[in-house]
Amino acid sequence: MSTPSFRLEADWNPEISTPGQLTISLVNTGDAPVSGFTLAVTSLFRIKPDSPIEGAQLLDQLSNYHLLAPEDGFVLEPGSRWSIVARQISHTLRHYTYGPKSAAITLSDGTMVLPEIVPMTLKGEPGAPIINTPERQPLADGETTISVIPFPAKVDVSGQRDLPAAIGFGAGPETARSAFEATSRLAERLFPGETLFGDSLAVKCADNRALRHGAYDIAFGDDVTLSASDMDGFRHGFITLAQILRGARRHPEDFTFPASGIISDAPRFGWRGSHLDVARQVYTVSEIKAFLDTMAWNKLNRFHIHLNDDEGWRLDVPEYPQLAEKAAWRGPGEILPPLLGSPFERHGIIYRADDVREVVDHGLAIGIETVPEIDIPGHCYCVLKALPHLADPEETGIYRSVQYFPNNALNPALDETYVFLEAVIKTLVELFPAKWIHIGGDEVADAAWSGSPQAKSMQGPNGWEGTFALQSYFLKRIQSLLSQYGKETGAWEEAALGGGVNADRSYLVAWKKSESGRELALQGYDVVLSPAEYAYFDMAQSNDWWEPGASWAGTVSLETCYSFTPAHDWPDDAQSKLIGVQSCLWCENLADRKLFDHLVYPRLSAIAETSWTPAATKDFRRFMAIQSLMPKARLG
Ligand code: TNX
């Protein structure tokens, strides 16, 4: 018998209906007819449940997992196609990445066949995904600078020194020597085969208590002298020197190694972060470490790791083995079906204590604190599937999250919820030394808990005060648990709803709009800005259909990303509430790891420059000349 084979095609046509028409076609590329089969597809789009579909029945669905079957008796002949048309779709589809990401055909005898998947087209027009690296744009003729990103606060240098063979450690305090050694190991990992550190130019290091945390000065003369008051300052100085050397070697027409003068540098913000969603896709410890290395070269210092979402839980909590055994896995027969491009087999990852320590220690050695996020009470679909006793047994009705997960929020009215979270927090406190723990708080559905008698019984003096009043009660209770451990609370901006968390000892990440941070600051919260329209790396970089990513917050070109000007219109009394800036990388589209570098670099460097360099010193033209020297994680 011949081996069955298939090709899966998809097309979006926004001109046929509103918002548009999605056609999915299965082509039989084998040489025997097939019947009695089903087709399972994961994607970014979601066909709305209970909406009419032409040519198929939707047998099952969870968020973006769809199980489809042709009408009874349908036979798919060799060389012919089965087409399904759907018009009620969760989003307007704007890029090929919204289309099918993984799929499987189950034949009538139960055999599973994986089709070839063709990237989704727009109105049938052929094309190919864009995966590229922005070109370096040289400086104007005769112009020179130093090749440093983020660009230092003050640069007053001149001349051109003969290039040293490497940056060496001359003399100085023990902190400087350790910073030198850690930076030299970092450079070896990032630029294998290049000599940046060695024993050539003997940099003299000096303690200067007048410099603030992370700040440094470099004086260029016969000697090169690096001054700082702490390890971070020395590390930053050595990174700057290595960047200067690399640039001057590669593009001597644009970049100098100064002969004299001074660089006086200090970060604009204490919080210079990057978030990574390790729930939607699987990231190995070594992939995370490679990402951290690129952060460090950009002088970023906070790694916000998003450890759970509806689609997966990543942290082993020994008291609840169901998390490691069930909630971390997707696949046929698992509590979660394949989603967002995961393969049709058991697929997932759980980080055990040693894995977490490896990530945390790797970060600390290069100046990065890892801030863990457990996203509660929403985004907990897989937790509630793995631990069904955490749901109110009397709950009626179905509410859905924006991502279409049904009843996915932990219930604030149940004692068991807090027993569970105490165990989770105990694990977090043991493994993550940073002073902050981020507790999510985003995107709880408006209707959450409205069908739970136990939640309803927690009425305020004026009756049921609604989902967000209850959310506030819940988040405050978790916040006080964290403060018993001496930890501060981080959360997304929605944690201010319904009464909010206490502003004291907390920070909120403003993500919806660049203005939302200002409101939070005026309410008294410390704010980290990560506005999606500038700082979300899952946003596509142009309107081109073939540009990967999403665009619910618009498109974020490198120039747009660079143009982000934090708090430029905040009143003076709110400015002190801005503690920093971070990027976010949500990973719905990153089953295809080849997209990682394209989405992240050099936008990571643009955010790094915004978080470090004084607004008036930023310069996109200079950035475009230097950015190509910055490292990539090369995960693809
Ligand atoms: C919104 S930003 C979310 C995430 C999604 C992201 C996609 C935030 C706090 N929640 O769940 O992954 O949009 O861009």
Image (spheres, rainbow, N blue to C red):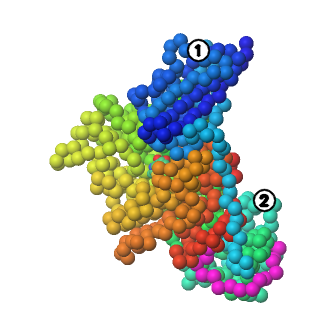
Which residue is depicted at the point 23% across and 47% down?
465
- Front residue of this view, candidates 37 and 262: 37
Mark sitting earlier along the chain (2/1): 1
State yes or no: Cβ of the residue under disc 2 lies below 8 Å from any atom of ligand 1.
no
- Front residue of this view, candidates 478 and 522: 522
Q: What residue type is disc 1 on?
A: Val
State yes or no: Cβ of the residue under disc 1 lies below 8 Å from any atom of ligand 1.
no
Category of crowding for the residue at label 1, using alpha-carbon neighbours closer than 10 angstroms: few (below 14), some (14–19), many (at least 20): some
Which residue is depicted at the point 69% across and 67% down?
137
Residue 490 in view (yes/no): no
Q: Does the magenta stretch include residue 167?
A: yes
Q: What residue type is disc 2 on?
A: Pro
- Front residue of this view, candidates 153 and 321: 153
Percent position of residue 455, x then y: 27, 40
Q: Is residue 418 magenta?
A: no
> Looking at the rendered structure, which numbered label has been put on residue 192?
2
Q: Tell me the magenta residue range.
A: 151-170
> Looking at the rendered structure, which numbered label has been put on residue 75?
1
Under circle 2, the secondary element is: loop
- The quadrant of the image that shows the N terminus is top right
